């Protein structure tokens, strides 16, 4: 964690270094870093914005990084992971919180009906099954229990290792999640399970209406004509390297969030249907050695109705949204994985990993090198049904619009453009990323003040682009039918 600093309290030594490097452009560099919110690895761009009249195509105004010190702009990295960039991750967490909370209570401002708060809402946790005995920390009212007491005569596995552990593991014990016997642990199945979690989830959502219909005494067709399932879910790595899923599941009417579900389904019944579905649903997959494996949820599935009552503790909507948002910024590191992609297999042997994670990562590499760092899990930590609530893109769009309103150059053009549409063409080249040690010190001083300069959407586009490739973004401003505002849309390089 970066220690919090007072915003704007930049160490004089760092400023001296910047002045030496950028001369008169040093204050502009400090301002650029401030606007990234103290991003640890911003992207450096050179280029220009040109404002054109939509009717005559004549240039109204032009702004180039070449004519302004320091000659470049900075865009935040936009990384979701707390381990990679705390300020960008914090912004993502806030968006995730809003996205989940808007699906629980609605948001008139963002176009999500507030009626959703009265729909049946369930918070569910789906676990992974066992792939072999691991060291564990189980805490109950009497404190930490013994890991695996084993009873009178200790069982010994075929490799001669006792399948018991009398210890009461402390919270930070590195053995938690590690296999008692690595030769007994089914690493291949564990990696396959992580890899097929998405398919298992889709099947769960598909089959949920069947259980709901059975509990409601309706045909599946009749139920489907009355309700729709919407959800938001996050993946969380367990110490043993298996992924758990935490989800908000909501029932809407046949036409989505704006309509109430018919058929009298309560949150209680939805919770029961989720639990029954989780117990029954399965996906059959083939392992790399041709072995067939049935992927299903573990026995521990927790479902509870979400309450609008503030005194409901962890069943209250705000608590649930906070919980999901927090996990959305984590990665496979909690399960012993790595926070970035592996390109060479040898990294698995060299990286600082537990033996357990290394064995799991080897199996995951065999399945797909692309997801080995994630122990087989394929990507998206937070996903949602389209109808659940707003999108990340919409939230970023709002931020971009807000910044555009505050940009004096754009305000000036807008003032001049009365009666005409103005098109803004942005054309920027990637020239690098990251910060020098002095710039890092400046960035750290801004981390306590969460003000962000540039949209994360453009940073995503830039990251995926090849270095030096042209990036064009087109924005239109001027009179529109709706309220005054901005719209931006990426256009392909000509
Ligand atoms: Zn960042
Ligand atoms: Zn143990
Ligand atoms: Zn064994």
Image (tube, rainbow, N blue to C red):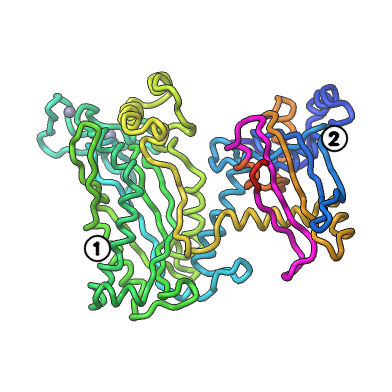
**Up-down: is 181 above or below 55?**
above
Q: Earlier in the sequence, mark 2 or mark 1?
A: 2
- The secondary element bearing badge 1 is classed as helix
At 83% from the left and 62% from the top, the residue drawn is 420
Question: Horizontal and vertical percent for residue 187?
Answer: 26, 33
Query: x%, y% of residue 68?
Result: 86, 36
Horizontal side of 154 relative to 416 (left or right) equals left
The quadrant in which the N terminus is found is top right
Question: Is residue 457 highlighted in magenta?
Answer: no
Q: Is residue 70 above or below residue 417?
A: above
Seen from the viewer's position, the closer of residues 468 and 325 is: 468
Q: Which residues are magenta?
A: 462-490
Q: Position of residue 93 (x, y in %)?
A: 56, 50
Q: Which residue is mark 2?
A: 27
What residue is shown at x 44% (from left), y 69% (from top)?
Answer: 307
Residue 449: horizontal and vertical position, in percent? 71, 46
Taking the image as shown, residue 406 lies to the left or right of residue 203, namely: right
Residue that badge 1 annotates: 276
Q: Is mark 1 within 8 Å of ligand 2?
A: no
Q: Secondary structure at mark 2?
A: helix
Classify 366 as above or below 428. Answer: above
Q: Nearer the viewer, residue 280 or 326?
A: 280
Ligand 2 visible in quadrant: top left
Which residue is depicted at the point 43% across and 23% down?
A: 352
Q: CA distance from mark 2 to mark 1?
A: 61 Å
Q: Residue furthest front?
A: 56
């Amino acid at each position: 964690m970066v220690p919090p600093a007072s915003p704007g309290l930049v160490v004089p030594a760092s400023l001296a270094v910047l002045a030496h490097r950028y001369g008169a452009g040093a204050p502009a560099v400090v301002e650029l870093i401030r606007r990234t919110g103290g991003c640890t690895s911003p992207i450096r761009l050179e280029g220009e914005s040109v404002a054109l009249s939509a009717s005559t195509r004549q240039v109204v105004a032009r702004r180039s990084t070449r004519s302004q010190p320091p000659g470049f702009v900075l865009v935040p990295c936009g990384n979701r992971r707390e381990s990679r960039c705390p300020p960008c991750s914090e912004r993502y967490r806030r968006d995730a919180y809003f996205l989940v909370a808007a699906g629980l209570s609605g948001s008139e401002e963002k176009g999500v009906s507030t009626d959703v708060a009265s729909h049946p809402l369930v918070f569910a946790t789906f676990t992974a099954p066992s792939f072999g005995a691991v060291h564990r920390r189980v805490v109950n009212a009497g404190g930490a229990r013994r890991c695996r007491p084993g009873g009178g005569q200790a069982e010994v596995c075929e490799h001669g290792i006792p399948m018991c552990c009398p210890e009461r593991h402390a919270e930070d014990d590195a053995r938690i999640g590690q296999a008692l016997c690595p030769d007994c642990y089914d690493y291949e199945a564990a990696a396959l399970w992580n890899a097929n979690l998405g398919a298992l989830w889709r099947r769960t959502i598909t089959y949920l209406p069947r259980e709901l219909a059975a509990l409601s005494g309706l045909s599946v067709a009749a139920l489907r004509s009355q309700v729709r399932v919407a959800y938001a879910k996050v993946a969380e790595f367990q110490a043993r390297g298996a992924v758990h899923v935490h989800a908000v599941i909501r029932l809407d009417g046949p036409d989505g969030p704006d309509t109430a579900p018919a058929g009298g389904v309560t949150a209680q019944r939805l919770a029961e249907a989720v639990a029954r579905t989780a117990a029954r649903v399965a996906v059959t997959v083939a392992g790399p050695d041709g072995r067939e494996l049935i992927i299903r949820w573990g026995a521990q599935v927790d479902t509870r109705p979400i309450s609008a009552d503030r005194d409901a503790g962890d069943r209250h909507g705000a608590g649930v949204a906070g919980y999901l948002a927090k996990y959305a910024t984590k990665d496979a590191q909690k399960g012993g994985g790595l926070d970035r992609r592996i390109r060479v297999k040898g990294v698995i042997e060299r990286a600082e990993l537990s033996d357990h994670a290394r064995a799991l990562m080897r199996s995951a590499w065999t399945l797909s090198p692309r997801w080995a760092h994630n122990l087989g899990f394929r990507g998206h930590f937070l996903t949602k049904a389209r109808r659940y609530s707003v999108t990340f893109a919409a939230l970023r769009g709002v931020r971009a619009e807000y910044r555009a309103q505050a940009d004096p150059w754009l305000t000036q053009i807008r003032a001049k453009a009365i009666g005409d549409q103005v098109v803004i063409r942005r054309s920027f080249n990637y020239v690098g990323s990251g910060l020098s040690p002095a710039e890092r010190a400046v960035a750290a001083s801004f981390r306590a003040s969460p003000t962000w300069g540039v949209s994360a959407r453009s940073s995503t586009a830039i990251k995926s682009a090849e270095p030096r490739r042209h990036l064009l973004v087109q924005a239109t401003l001027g009179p529109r039918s709706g309220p005054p505002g901005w719209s931006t849309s990426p256009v392909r390089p000509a």
